[in-house]
Amino acid sequence: MSSRLARLAVIATVTGSFSGLFGVGGGTIIVPLLILWFGYGEREATGTSLGAIAIIAALAAGAHGLYGNVDPVKALLIGLPAVGGVVAGTALQQRISERVVAGAFAVVLVVSALALVF
Amino acid sequence: MELSDLVGALAIGLAAGMAGGLVGVGGGVLMVPGLVIFLGESQLEAEATSLLAIVGVAAVGAWRQNGYGNLRLSDAVVIGVLSPLGVLVGPSSPTPSASGCWRSRSPPSRSTSPTAWRGARSRPPRRLKRRRGSLAA
């Protein structure tokens, strides 16, 4: 197995565990590791992270669905405005510097940490 | 559901999507408390439901980023496809947050929607009818 594939596999396993346990997509793991291990730019890391998250979240939602924990109506209720938000967010990201994107990511990390603790 | 709860849920969804598009996360860190506080979900149900919402958010976000030339599809697919081993650890193990990180504003309800995928594990135990003349006091 190539070193690159092995590192991607590590990212995948850690992200999958995080997603299954805490119900989040795992971007807080994927983005920094893609930047630190693979030398991605901020925008490339966020774009690739979203691609991976779509697959990971689908698998995790399916697994949770088997346990009867998923409510599709409420997912739609909160997901529809989120889709509008993600279109606006990606458009905004193209217009700001990568340094600002990194700062915004740091804020999200802090919020995530506080949410998990409290 | 009160109007303020509905508005709160929509606002949380919008903020989660914005955060997702801006920094490449799914937005679950905002959606989970939003589902608990405004839509009355339990912590575990909120985590599961947020994942379903994230599928659409991340797919649309990735599609948009691909248009901007920021998606390395092969790496994304490798990470996504190799993740099931880690994903399966989560739902099959007792949730670490079962005690409830977030508290609902409304009284807890198990059957919040008629279309909810409710499995056997989440159903309350059936109450047994007492037979006439049984020894039970």
Image (spheres, grey):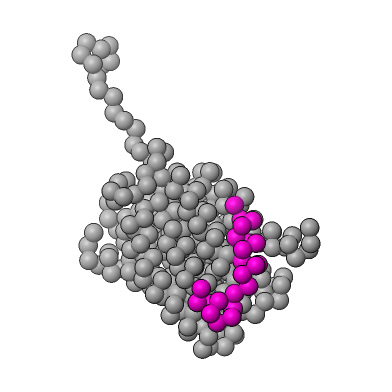
In x, y percent, where is residue A39?
71, 76
Please tell me whether residue B53 is drawn above or below residue B67 in the rendered image: above
The residue sitting at the left extreme is B132
Q: Residue at x 25, y 22 (%)?
A: B129
Q: Image quadrant of residue B72? A: bottom right
Please tell me whether residue B114 is drawn above or below residue B129 in the rendered image: below
In x, y percent, where is residue A96?
53, 88
How many labels were placed on the picture? 0
Q: Toward the viewer: B38 or A117?
A: B38
Please tell me whether residue B80 is drawn above or below residue B84 in the rendered image: below
- Tell me the magenta residue range: B63-84
Please tell me whether residue B133 is drawn above or below residue B117 in the rendered image: above
Which quadrant: the N terminus of chain A? Answer: bottom right
Q: Is residue A84 left or right of residue A6?
A: left
Q: Residue at x 49, y 67 (%)?
A: B59
The answer to whether residue B115 of the structure is visible from this angle is yes
Q: Main secondary structure of the magenta part?
A: helix
Q: Image quadrant of residue B71? A: bottom right
Q: Is residue B74 magenta?
A: yes
Q: Toward the viewer: A112 or B54?
A: B54
In x, y percent, where is residue A104?
53, 79
The answer to whether residue B100 of the structure is visible from this angle is no
Q: Residue at x 33, y 57 (%)?
A: A73
Q: Is residue B26 left or right of residue B40?
A: right
Q: Residue at x 64, y 59 (%)?
A: A12
Q: Toward the viewer: A98 or A61?
A: A61
Q: Is residue A17 magenta?
A: no
In x, y percent, where is residue B119?
40, 41
